[in-house]
Image (tube, grey):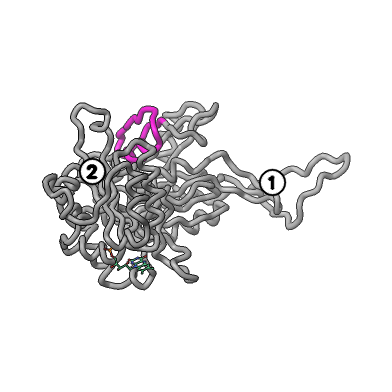
Amino acid sequence: MEQRQHGSPQESRPRVVLGVSGGIAAYKACELLRRLTESGHDTQVVPTASALRFVGEATFSALSGRPVSTDVWESVHEVPHVRIGQSADLVVVAPATADILAKAAHGLADDLLTNTLLTARCPVVFAPAMHTEMWEHPATQENVATLRRRGCLVIEPAVGRLTGADTGKGRFPEPEAVFEFCRGVLARGTAAERTDLTGRHVVVSAGGTREPLDPVRFLGNRSSGKQGFALARTAAARGARVTLVAANSELPGPAGVDVVRVGTAAQLREAVLEAAADADAVVMAAAVADFRPAAYAEGKIKKRKDAEPEPLELVRNPDILAELSTDRARAGQIVVGFAAETDDVLANGRAKLARKRCDLLVVNEVGEGKTFGAEENEAVVLGADGSETAVPYGPKDVLSDKVWDLVALRFP
Ligand SMILES: Cc1cc2nc3c(=O)[nH]c(=O)nc-3n(C[C@H](O)[C@H](O)[C@H](O)COP(=O)(O)O)c2cc1C
C-alpha cells in the first residue's frame, strides 16, 4: 500500500476511497474513478470480491495508479483495514449493492471495504443500484434509513433501464452526477453542517418558463437553470429529499434528486404546489413568466404580405411565489424567492419581499452577461426579519449553501 508523503503535492489532494461492490453497474465506477483522478483527487479503489467478477483489478489499478486489494490480509504491516478509512476525506461506495448496504448498516467487517466503512470518520456516500424489488424491500429500506440516521448520504437511485429488459427505480445515476455529488460533499465543512437537512423535504424550481404563442414560437427568458440545479444538488448533499421542478433546462438531473420537467408557468405552478404539500421549504429560483399570450394559435402564425403584425395581447400569469407565501401548505414551511433586478437592486428587492411575503429573497443583479448562464453569482439575501446577508461573487454552489444555511436557521 502506498503511504502519503509529507510535504508532497500528494498531501494536499483530497483523498477519496472509491468502494465498488458487485452490481452490474460496477463498470460505471470506472468512469467515476476517471473523473475523480482527472480532477485531482487522490483515489484509492477498494472493491469487493464480487465487484472484481464484473471489472478486473487491472482496470481499477491502472486508472487509479494504485494497487487494489479486497481483503485485510494483504500488506498487513501497513494495517490497511484501519489506515485507509482513517485517512480518507471521503468514502463513496458506487455502486452500492443491497448486500453492502446491509453489511454497513449492521457493522459487519469481513473484507477491506466493510472494515474501511467502520474506520472512516469522513463523509460516507452510498450510490445504490439494484433491481426495483431489491431496493423497495423493507430490509433494504430499513438499512438505508439506518445509514441515513447515522449521517451517511445515500443517493436515491435513478429510474430507468435496469440489468435486463426491465425498467424501474434502482438504476445507478450517471457517473457525472455522482461525481458532482461527491465534489459537493467534499466542499462542505463539519459533520453537523453536512447533514443538517436530513429528514427534510425541499422543493426547488429552476430554469425559465416558456409561454407558447403557436406551435413553433414562445415567450421565454434567459434562465439556464444553473442556480436552481445548484440549490437542488447542495440540498441533496446536505441530506435533504429534493424535488426539483425544472423548466426548460438542458442540464442533467443531479444525483439523488427527483426531477419534474415542465414547460409553462401553469405547469410549473401545478408541479410546485403538488410537491410543496409536504415540503419543509420551497425555493423559487425559476424565472417564471409574469405574462403569457392571451391566445394560442393552433397553426404557425403567418407573415402577412405588406401588413403590419397583429398586436400581441398578453394576460397575467398567477403569482406562484405570493401564493406559496400567503397560503402556506404546512405550518412552519419556509418560502424563498429570487429577484433578478437590473437597477435599484436592493430597493426593488425589499419592496418585492414585502409584497410577496416570503421568508427570504435572494436578490441579484442581472444583465450585461451577469448571472444568466454563468457559473458564478453574487447576491444579497434579504430576510423578512430585516436581516441582510451579502454573498460575494463566487460559484453558484456557494450561494446555494448560504441559502440553505439561512433556511435551516429558520426551521421551527
Ligand atoms: C449479473 C449479476 C448482477 C447483479 N447485479 C446486482 C445489482 O445491480 N445490485 C445488487 O445489489 N446486487 C446485484 N447482484 C448480486 C450481488 O452480486 C450479490 O448480492 C453479491 O453477494 C454482492 O456482493 P458485494 O456486496 O460484496 O459486492 C448481481 C449479481 C449478478 C450475478
Q: Which residue is most to the right?
A: 306
Q: Is residue 354 above or below residue 71?
A: above
At mark 1, the secondary structure is loop
> What span is in magenta?
378-403
Callout 2 environment at 10 Å: few (<14), some (14 to 19), or many (20+)?
Answer: few
| Residue 42 in magenta stretch | no
Amino acid type of the residue tagged 1 in the rendering? Glu
310 to the left or right of 288: right
Image coords of residue 244 (percent x, y): 43, 52
Image coords of residue 98 (percent x, y): 29, 66
At mark 2, the secondary structure is helix
The residue indicated by pointer 1 is 313
Q: The N terminus is located in which quarter?
A: top left
| Residue 402 in magenta stretch | yes
- Residue positioned 69% across, 46% down in the render: 313
- Which quadrant of the picture is home to ligand 1? bottom left
61 to the left or right of 109: right
Image coords of residue 274 (percent x, y): 44, 61
340 to the left or right of 154: right
Q: Residue 86 falls in which quadrant of the image?
A: top left
In depth, the one of 244 and 127 nearer the eye is 127
Q: Is residue 355 above or below residue 151?
A: above
Q: Alpha-carbon distance for marks 2 and 1?
A: 49 Å
The residue indicated by pointer 2 is 193
Q: Is mark 1 within 8 Å of ligand 1?
A: no
Q: Is residue 55 above or below residue 7?
A: below
116 to the left or right of 37: left
In this view, the mark in front (2 or 1)? 2
- Residue positioned 49% across, 43% down in the render: 225
The answer to whether residue 223 shows anywhere in this view is yes
- Residue positioned 21% across, 60% down in the render: 104
